[in-house]
Amino acid sequence: MGSALNQCIIRLHEEHHALEDYQGGVPRWCGGCGDNAILAAVQRLCRDEDLAPERTVFVSGIGCSSRFPHYMKTYGFHGIHGRAFPIAEGVKMARPDLHVFVNTGDGDCCSIGAAHWIHAIRYNMNLTVILHDNHVYGLTKKQASPTSPMGFKSNTTPRGAVLEPLNPLTVSLGVANASFIAQGVDWMPEQLYDIIHKAFKHRGFSFVRIIQRCPEFLPKMFEPWLHDPGKTLVLTHANGLQPSADVNRVYRNQREHDPLDLDAAREIASCEDPIPVGILYHNPAIPCYEDLRHAGAPRSPALTRAGLEAELDKYTIWPEQDSELARAA
Amino acid sequence: MNDTALLDRPETPVSTKPALDLPEHIVEVISDSGEGAQRCGQSLAAIAARSGNGIWTVEIIPAEIQPPARSVAGASGIRIRMGAGRITNGGDQTDLVVAFNEQVLLGRVRAGELKPGATILLESVWREHKDPKIVASYTETLKALLDGGFRVVEMPLERECRALMSDPKRGKNMFVLGMLCSIYSFDLELARAQIALIFGKKDAKVISSNVRLMEAGFDWAERTLDFKYRIPAEAVSVPQVVVSGNTAIALGVLASGMDICAMYPITPATSASHYLSECFERVGGLVHQAEDEIAACAFAIGASYAGRCAVTITSGPGYSLKQEGLGLAVMAEIPLVVVNVQRGGPSTGQPTKVEQGDLLTSIYGSHGDAPKVVMAVSGIEDCFYSMITARKIAETFNMVVVVLSDASLSTAQQPFPRPEFSEDWLAPPLDQTPVPEGAKPYDWDPVTGIARRFIPGQPGGMHTITGLAHDRLSKVAYDPAINEEGLRARSLKLAALQKTLKAPPVYGAPEGELLLVGWGGTQGAIEEAVDRLRAQGRAVSSLHLRFIQPLPSGIREVLRRFKQVMTIEGNWSDSLKDELIDEDNRRYSALAMMLRSRYLVDVDCWSEARGQPIKPGSVVDVALAQMNKHKPQNS
């Protein structure tokens, strides 16, 4: 008996995963890049939720953000620019049993992949989506992205960006079937973890925009926010997040916000200073596309045969019975 | 299946007119859009097939949903070629036309689609129209047609139908169906059963009113027409199915064990997805209408990556949009089936018209070296089985398989032996077994280039696939040699497949004066031309290619056994008759270009891009001209 118990304990121990079980290649992001904070939070989430690495898939597009799957020791799909959403949707539709994450950047999601982003929200498939928003194209060396601030001088906007930036939160909250929209910042790691955790727990399309620093191309962009906690608006609610004592001590600018209140969410989303941090919208009642389409429905040779025969029957001319058939009609 | 027993029905009139036996006949029904000519023609074809005749249908489709009424460009209709034996194409010129107005007919006359002296059954309601211009147009056209030597029979279609229903415009097609059943001596019972089948989803009233219309048309023809035909039929010995090419593709997807079809609407491909949407879910499959062509491709790639082989169905412009995604699937070695139902191009081109313009883009498209398998379907039966073959190749070699069909095949109907389901058609069950320790996700076989794929869910197989050049561990390659190692492996897979392929049989004799080479939907027309030429004593044969990338071995030997080789294609090629065109700048047709470069054989080409299926008569003329051109001077 004793040995059986020991076996059981050993098995339990083996089946429980440690952080290292999720750590893939050594990240090649720049020192101080906000992507590192996101990676740490996500690896922690995988460990805490004890996700089986073989049943977990990280899908990404192209850009600094989209290197993410290479640094996980799970299955990963580093795709093509802008198309992480439809690839992830295909994975999820084929295999609703898998945990599917999407890592995308502001160029990947809000520019080249914007059409897919809008429709991905509408499909509301059970995906955990992380928008790594560093407000600049990094991998292609400093071009303005849709979220770059006005006046931002880049290689394609040497005299400063002339357009108002796109706000990923208001866009997301404007799409039918939005079910989970949240925002985090890379310099609040605890809060970031909690938000990603909530996102993972939501069954549906969980969209987390993470404002992250790019030390290479926009090094000073968020300094005012780092120096003044008052420029961050922490969202709190019993159905959302309850900030830790540490967060409460530093971030006094807080607002009680019911994540089911879509109008208030849109109002908060449109505010860029202070930066809202927390869960803007969460509606667990929106149905998932894969459920509506019966993903994972059983297939069997017998079923296929029956279905094919039934269809062929509609178009078949039988040799001898045909004339009888017509007469019978 | 049919409830016509419920209907009250008069006795079938027994025809007393003698019927003239014909080996084959080509019929067209031409109307304004929305008057149901296609439904009428498809029904006639089905009835002919059920009677044991060979059939082939060609739809004539205007680009607009509601083009202006009574316009030459708005002609909507169908050609049905019926024969005593097997029919493989739409033939040359029409023997008998039913036209709902003289304008839509004019388009066909001007295009030379009518046989000299053809019979025209023309709706006569326009004779009494309140607009004198229409009356004049009608009478002038009628006179011109008679002067042109056509046999024109005026038929009071609308007047006859008005006696049976309030809106005669809606029922003319069934009246015409009955009329044609009388003309071709088809069994009325078969026509009734066919109406019950096509209106099966509607209530019995709809069926009975359409049956009455059909019977009225039959009676009218029996009473009025002084001609009647009969095409000898051979009773079918094995069960046959009569479906269009796109329906056959959908049935093939269903039978292939593929699970997911991701698509975006595009003519003329969409009807395959329409039909699949009807029946796929019943067997656990799914059609996903994506937000765009790119997403449809990416969705299919995602599903295939996760272990459920997927298909995406499109046409030329959609195929162009998928190209980057296809490059990813090639690089990451994800099996994928892509159907391209070709239409005229570039751009929106001729969306409802046929062309074979996408061969080179299918083979060489996408960026960098992206080896893909490209096969072309040549008939309706082939549409069905090619989907099963494509899925198998895709999953065996972890490759993208492009299946080329075309607008003509998409709607053409032709009977073929009912497929007998085999479990071998299906994909093996999803592999979720642990990956052996030390196994690599891209452990390319040194000879075949094939690597076993790890599918999410397989313990120990975790890796990140990428569109970046990668090594055997799927790690991004920074070493130049590794890039070439991957390129080599992906290229070798084509050779590995090629070694399993057999050259297609030569149609006609294995050697001779001229070899015609074709691909895709032109097979029937080319082979019929070969038959006619051989009947004239000409040493002409043909070769029809199903696999174009890779090309099977043995083709060079076939080409070399003929004095001349020329491809027959439905795409653009420059003509040497143009002032600026010479052998230094002449652009050859796609297949000719490929054959020339691969085999160093002087392959000529003839092509047309008129948006119409190539006719056997055209091929005969071309072949004769080619042989005369190169006739030895002193013979």
Image (cartoon, coloured by chain):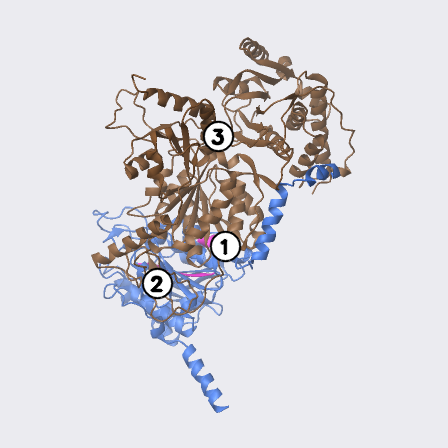
Chain colours: A blue, B brown
Reply above or below: B102 against B293. Answer: above
Disc 2 to disc 1, C-alpha distance: 38 Å
Return the residue at label 2.
Answer: B441
The x and y percentages for residue B15 are: 73, 23
Reply above or below: A240 against A159. Answer: below
Q: Secondary structure at mark 1?
A: loop
Q: Identity of the amino acid at label 2? A: Pro
Which residues fall within the magenta stretch? Answer: A120-133
Return the residue at label 1.
Answer: A177
Question: Are labels 2 and 1 assigned to the same chain?
Answer: no
Picture residue at 42% right of the left edge, 51% below the top: B393
Mark 1 crowdedness (10 Å alpha carbons): few <14, some 14-19, many ≥20:
many
Q: Secondary structure at mark 3?
A: loop
Question: Are labels 3 and 1 assigned to the same chain?
Answer: no
Question: Are labels 2 and 3 assigned to the same chain?
Answer: yes
Residue B290 visible in the current orientation:
no
Of B585 and A47, the residue lying toward us:
B585
Return the residue at label 3.
Answer: B63
The x and y percentages for residue B437 are: 36, 71
Picture residue at 47% right of the left edge, 89% below the top: A3
Chain of the residue on which disc 3 is drawn: B
- Residue B293: give its label: none
Q: Identity of the amino acid at label 3? A: Ala
Disc 3 to disc 1, C-alpha distance: 36 Å
Of B555 and B307, the residue lying toward us:
B555
